[in-house]
Amino acid sequence: MTCSIVGDYTYTWTDSANQVIEGVNGNTYTPTESGTYSVFVSNGQGCEITCSISIEIESVYELIQGWNWNDKHIN
């Protein structure tokens, strides 16, 4: 997810439990779990905005190294 605002802004991302996501302070965050995420954006002049989005993460399949597809069988 990317919050595209130009300028000198502070970004605070929160997870579904409304907990601040530590270590994420830029305009981009990639969630790893389904849920509702929010970003609070502010600047030094007192302008503020909050945006939220619900994300559903589908299963990610990882190929096991050393296996390959051979005709109709996995080796």
Image (cartoon, rainbow, N blue to C red):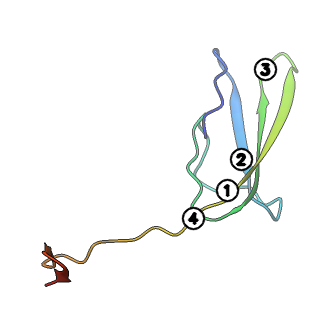
Which amino acid type is marked by label 2? Trp
Q: Is residue 38 above or below residue 51?
A: below
Q: Which callout, 2 or 1, points at the residue further toward the start of the chain?
A: 2
Q: Which callout, 2 or 3, points at the residue further toward the start of the chain?
A: 2
Which amino acid type is marked by label 3? Gly
Secondary structure under the numbered disc 4 in the rendered image: loop
Residue extending farthest to the front is: 72
Is there a contact, CB below 8 Å, between mark 4 and mark 2? no
Residue at which label 3 appears: 44
Quote the CA–CA distance across marks 4 and 1.
21 Å
Quote the CA–CA distance across marks 3 and 1.
22 Å
Secondary structure under the numbered disc 1 in the rendered image: loop
Dividing the picture into quadrants, the one containing residue 22 is bottom right
Is there a contact, CB below 8 Å, between mark 2 and mark 1? yes
- The one of 38 and 67 positioned closer to us in this rendering: 67
Q: What is the number of the mark on residue 21? A: 1
**Mark nearer the viewer, 4 or 1:** 4
Residue at which label 4 appears: 58
